[in-house]
Image: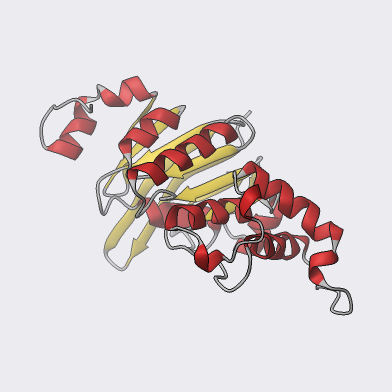
């Protein structure tokens, strides 16, 4: 069974081809990493999967349903959750309030303004569950502004999980993190493996090799290799793309 199937995806901006006949499949429970040198088109690709950029050609199928023309909110309601490179939390709200907002947004209904938001069990129970999954239960009452950068990225993960996704699209979740912060996110993602189908775009190769079931390598928007960690480590074409020579990843 295939959860996500991408068929011959193309994205052109004028005369520039950023996604070039890209095909890829994810099976349920898989963590599939997409890597490539700067300018390979990774973020453009993930933006097409989330619906923020329309492809020039090709198809995207989610559980066999063609979603190529569906807007982002419809994809989210179908179970596609997305995180971004740039932190996007409400800094003046508490950690729990941020996640409660994400629960409300996914539910698609308005708050009951005559009832205090933080007393609405329908919001708080799934919000607390998402915080626990993200390892932030102990920070529920902290202001997001007081969190470290890595902790805010974990909060964004909790907000994504609060939407009850079936497919996670993670765009550089470790961007700008210290080594210690990156390790915490790797541990978080390792704990989510098998529970969610995940497409991970990430520059941190140690994290990719520690987490991925399979890896797809993009160069100038084109897939040059897909395989297991060991297959990608020892692929001469991949090494050439990264290092300019057949130098094995370490």
Task: Please report the residue visible at 45 percent of the width from the left and 37 percent of the height from the top.
Answer: 186
Viewer-nearest residue: 56 or 173? 173
Which color scheme did the rendering employ for the protein? secondary structure
Viewer-nearest residue: 15 or 232? 232
Task: Please report the residue visible at 39 percent of the width from the left and 55 percent of the height from the top.
Answer: 43
Q: Position of residue 47 (x, y in %)?
A: 47, 58
The C terminus: image quadrant: top left
Residue 175 position (above or below residue 205): below
Extreme right residue here? 114
Q: Is residue 106 left or right of residue 120?
A: left
Viewer-nearest residue: 56 or 217? 217
- Does residue 48 appear in this view? no
- Does residue 83 appear in this view? yes
Q: Position of residue 52 (x, y in %)?
A: 51, 64
Extreme left residue here? 245
The mark total stands at: 0
Q: Position of residue 80 (x, y in %)?
A: 62, 50
Task: Please report the residue visible at 38 percent of the width from the left and 35 percent of the height from the top.
Answer: 208
Q: Position of residue 192 (x, y in %)?
A: 59, 35
Q: Kindly indicate the quadrant of the structure image that contains residue 124.
A: bottom right
Q: Is residue 22 left or right of residue 67?
A: left
Q: Kindly indicate the quadrant of the structure image that contains residue 219.
A: top left
The N terminus: image quadrant: top right
């Amino acid at each position: 069974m295939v959860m996500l199937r991408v068929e011959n995806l193309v994205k052109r901006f004028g005369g520039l081809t950023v996604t070039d006949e890209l095909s890829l499949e994810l099976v349920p429970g898989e963590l599939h990493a997409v890597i490539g040198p700067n300018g390979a088109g990774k973020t453009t690709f993930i933006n097409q999967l989330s619906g923020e950029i329309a492809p020039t050609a090709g198809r995207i199928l989610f559980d066999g349903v063609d979603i190529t023309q569906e807007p982002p909110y419809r994809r989210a309601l179908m179970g596609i959750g997305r995180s971004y490179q740039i932190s996007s939390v409400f800094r003046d709200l508490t950690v729990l309030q941020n996640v409660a907002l994400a629960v409300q947004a996914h539910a698609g209904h308005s708050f009951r303004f005559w009832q205090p938001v933080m007393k609405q069990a329908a919001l708080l129970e799934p919000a607390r569950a998402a915080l626990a999954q993200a390892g932030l239960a102990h920070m529920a009452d902290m202001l997001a502004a007081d969190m470290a950068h890595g902790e805010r990225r974990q909060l964004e993960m909790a907000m994504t999980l609060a939407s009850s996704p079936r497919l996670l699209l993670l765009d550089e979740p470790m961007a700008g993190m210290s080594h210690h912060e990156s390790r915490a996110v790797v541990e978080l993602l390792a704990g989510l493996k098998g529970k969610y189908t995940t497409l991970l775009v990430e520059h941190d190769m140690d994290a990719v090799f520690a987490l991925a079931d399979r890896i797809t390598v993009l160069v100038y928007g084109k897939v040059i290799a897909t395989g297991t960690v060991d297959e990608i480590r020892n692929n001469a074409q991949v090494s050439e793309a990264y290092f300019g020579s057949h130098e094995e990843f370490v």
